[in-house]
Amino acid sequence: MNCSGISVKYWINKEKIDYKNILIISDDIYLHFGNLRLRGKGGDGGHNGLKNIEKELGTSHYARLRFGIKNNNFSSKVNYVLENWDKEEYKKLSQKLFSIGIDIIFSFIENGLQKTMNLFNKKLI
C-alpha cells in the first residue's frame, strides 16, 4: 500500500482516466474510528500510500475518502494500523459504516465530487 502511487499512475495512463474521476480510499489514524471525510485535494496526513500517490502523480489534487481508525489505546502506530479490528469496532462497521461508504462511492461515480461532498460531508462530520 505504501507504493500504491505506482499502480494508480499506471491505470490512469493505461485507461486515460481524468484525475477528476479518481477516488482514493484510505485509512486515517488521525480521524476517530468510523468518521469518514471526503475531500477533493489535500495533504497526505502522514499516510505513506497517499504520499506515494502524490509523488507519482505530481499533485495532491485528486479525491480521497478517508476512513477514521483512531483509537487512543495503542503503543505502536504501525502495529495498530495492521491489527484486526476489535469486537466493538467490528460491530460499528457491520451496522452502518460500510453502507455509508458504499453510498459515497456510488454517488461519486454517478454525481461527481462536489455533489457527493454536498450530500455527505454534512452527515459525516
Image (cartoon, rainbow, N blue to C red):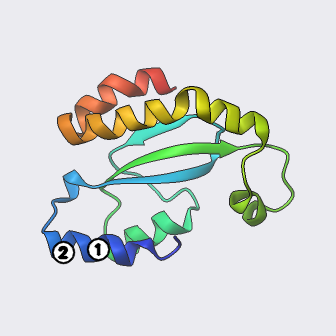
Please tell me which residue is depicted at 35% across the width and 60% down the height of the picture: 60
- Return the residue at label 1: 9
Q: Residues within 10 Å of mark 2 (few under 14, many from 20)?
A: few
Q: CA distance from mark 1 to mark 2?
A: 6 Å
In this rendering, would 44 be left or right of 77? left
- Tell me if 79 is positioned left or right of 105 in this view: right
Three-letter residue code for mark 2: Asn
Where does the image place residue 12, in percent across and percent down from the top left?
22, 69
- Number of marks drawn: 2
Q: Quick check: 3 left or right of 84?
A: left
Provide residue 38's location: percent of width, then percent of height: 41, 39
Q: Amino acid at mark 1?
A: Lys
Q: Nearer the viewer, residue 60 or 48?
A: 48
| Residue found 47% across the figure and 77% down from its top | 3
Find numbered disc 1 in the image and state the secondary structure of the residue it sits on: helix
x then y, percent, for residue 83: 74, 58
